[in-house]
Image (spheres, grey):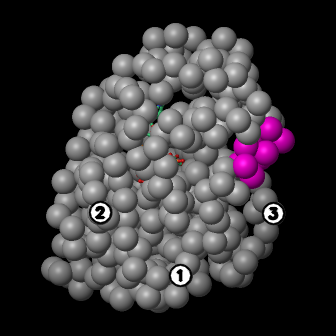
Amino acid sequence: MKLLVCGGAGFIGSTFARQRVLEHGDRVTVYDKLTYAGREENLQALSGHAGFRFVKGAIEDAATLAVTLEEERPDAIVNFAAETHVDRSIAEPDAFVRTHALGTYVLLEAARERELRYLQVSTDEVYGSIEVGTFTEESPLHPSSPYSATKTGADLLVQSYFHTYGLPVTICRGSNNYGPYQYPEKLIPLMILNALHGDPLPVYGDGMQVRNWIHAADFSRAIGHVLEHGELGEVYNAGGPDEEANMDVVRRIVELTGASESLIEHVVDRPGHDRRYSLSSEKVRALGWEPQVRFEQGLAETIDWYRENEDWWRPIRSGEYLAYYERQYGRALQS
Ligand code: NAD
Ligand code: DAU
């Protein structure tokens, strides 16, 4: 397949691009705006590969997108491009509206004009919080943050292009991802790097919120599976095999890094904090996908990756992230 992978310089998009080029022999063009979260170094393994090209461009920029599509003539667009951090959406929602609403619309129009397959990468957060049980694809949509509300809007727009224009779309909704190359604003890499540096570990509220963890390699495989085998117009959930309370995740990281438990600090809770996410993945399992990585093993390997890849995180941890951290947590990183 020839794929245009939007947002492919980010954490999950770059994992997907590596998988598709190196394991499936696809031709992949990554199209990415390179926000603070988009990093070309995430694609280093593909640099110089005949099946790979990088184009800097925003999904809302119809002109650059049109030139890229003319040059590449892909079979499908896979859209990972998004603003992805809930806390940033609470502090500054505007980029979330622009990318998720306008950006998705521009991509859909480009796909419609050229009759391209379109896969939207989405999230379990569109369903909101669930105290007991699990969400299926039929569950009502109850997003709670500007991040999840704008992602929900994008999903609805994608579905409208199927119903109205017959655009061949699918949507794949993932649970919380973890693994190498994740920007350190997210819970797991933030706690790993703080633990390795002896910085405090800021747990929001009581830390008993539950997340359904999936390794980014497993989620990427699910997306590839839906692209190849999914029924057009359908939504597929892809949840990880393990659920954990945040406090348990942080305690595991403390143990595996050899840090002191005294670094754990309960800080003011996230406004509108969703208590629990949980996804049923029966529908994508019926297509033949299964998650391969259990959390215990994946977390230990992820910690090893951060230990061994200081070259990757050092420029991030001493750049934009420093100012963000101080704004968000009201304190500077000490080291
Ligand atoms: P990320 O923040 O690491 O990467 C996002 C990428 O999108 C970056 O490379 C960024 O430069 C690019 N981007 C942002 N706005 C853009 C625009 N307007 N035009 C072009 N490129 C743009 O995100 P991630 O964690 O890899 O998430 C990827 C996708 O998966 C997102 O759609 C997200 O909603 C979804 N998702 C993430 C998770 C998770 O736990 N991280 C779980 C489920 C679904
Ligand atoms: O569920 C899928 C979603 O998972 C994706 O759609 C989002 O893009 C992704 O960011 C993630 O959202 P969360 O809000 O669940 O992830 P985050 O890593 O920000 O937080 C995970 C949990 O940890 C959440 O309950 C908040 C808590 N937390 C987070 C941070 C950054 C803390 O207690 N302290 C922190 O410093």
Q: Secondary structure at mark 3?
A: loop
Q: Amino acid at mark 3?
A: Gly
Q: Which residue is mark 1?
A: 289
Q: Amino acid at mark 1?
A: Trp
Give the quadrant of the N terminus. Answer: bottom right
Overall secondary structure of the magenta section: helix
Residue 251 location (% of width, % of height): 60, 35
Q: CA distance from mark 2 to mark 3?
A: 47 Å
Q: Which residue is mark 3?
A: 48
Q: Which residues are magenta?
A: 300-308
Q: Secondary structure at mark 2?
A: loop
Q: Which residue is mark 2?
A: 133
The residue nearer to you, when weighing 172 against 157, is: 172
Q: CA distance from mark 1 to mark 3?
A: 31 Å
* Earlier residue among tags 1 and 2: 2
Q: Residue at x 52, y 10 (%)?
A: 331
Is residue 47 within the magenta segment?
Answer: no
Q: Residue at x 68, y 27 (%)?
A: 195
* Up-down relation of residue 253 to residue 129 (above or below): above
Give the quadrant of the C terminus. Answer: top right
Residue 244 location (% of width, % of height): 49, 49
Q: Amino acid at mark 2?
A: Gly
Residue contact at pointers 1 and 3, CB within 8 angstroms: no
The residue nearer to you, when weighing 198 against 323, is: 198
Residue 53 seen in the figure: yes
Residue 158 location (% of width, % of height): 27, 69
Q: Secondary structure at mark 1?
A: loop
Specify whether 49 is left or right of 76.
Answer: right
